[in-house]
Amino acid sequence: MKPIEYGIYVFNDGEFYTPEEYGEKPAEGVLLFTEYASIIIDTNGQIGKITWDEAMSIAKDKGKMIPDNHECIEMASHFEEIKKVINQIGGEKIDGWFWSSSQFAESIAWNYNFGGYMGIISKLCNCNVRTITKIK
């Protein structure tokens, strides 16, 4: 794998590309690489709204994770760039509230909006899901 600097990249077939060099074609995800996060954001989220437990189950079934609060903050900080690259590679539009894996209490979890807002909500409520893969 080629060394990269902090930024937003396209991820496909185990390789990372700048959005400019990759172009407008389908890809697996978007790499967010910052001082605080190294994650691949899946191109497509779960269509429809689901409970927190269902979100955790979907992530586990896919061998993925739901972003925690720190990752959500990083994603929100780079929202415009991420949105642009997801659109470029034909990904599903990012819109609405998404689950965080971080829990506030036994029956309450954090949720976030890619526009930079975070809140807490009952795990029985419905939010969207955007799975990630952590890069070590």
Image (spheres, rainbow, N blue to C red):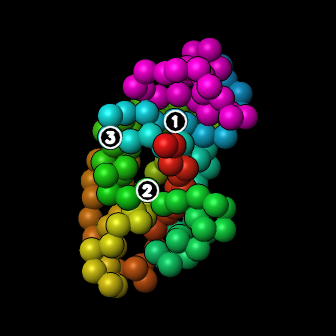
Q: Residues within 10 Å of mark 3 (few under 14, many from 20)?
A: few
Q: Position of residue 35 (x, y in %)?
A: 32, 34
Write down the quadrant of residue 118 in the picture. bottom left
Quadrant of image for the N terminus: top right
Cα distance, mark 3 to mark 2?
13 Å
**Residues packed near mark 2 inside 10 Å, few (<14), some (14 to 19) or many (20 plus):** many
Q: Position of residue 117 (x, y in %)?
A: 27, 53
Amino acid type at circle 2 is Pro
Q: Are marks 3 and 1 in contact (CB under 8 Å)?
A: no
Return the disc, 3 or 2, that comes first in the chain's sequence: 3
Which mark, residue 31? 1
Name the residue beneath numbered marker 2: 67
The quarter of the displayed image where residue 17 is located:
top right
Q: Is residue 3 magenta?
A: yes
Q: Can residue 25 be seen at all in this image of the molecule?
A: yes
At numbered mark 1, what does the secondary structure look like: helix, strand or loop? strand
Instruction: Pick whichever of labels 2 and 1 is earlier in the sequence.
Output: 1
Label 3 close to label 2 by CB (< 8 Å): no
Q: Is residue 87 among the parts visible in the rendering?
A: no
Residue name at image x 34 percent, y 85 percent: 107
The mark tally for this picture is 3
How dense is the environment of label 1, judged by Cα within 10 Å: few (below 14), some, or many (20 and up)?
many
Q: Amino acid at mark 3?
A: Tyr
Disc 3 versus disc 1: nearer the observer = 3
Q: Given this view, does label 3 or label 2 mark the residue nearer the observer?
A: 3
Q: Which region is colored magenta?
A: 1-22
Residue receiving disc 3 = 36
Residue drawn at x 67%, y 40% as measured from the top left: 28
Q: Is 13 left or right of 50, judged from the image as shown? A: right
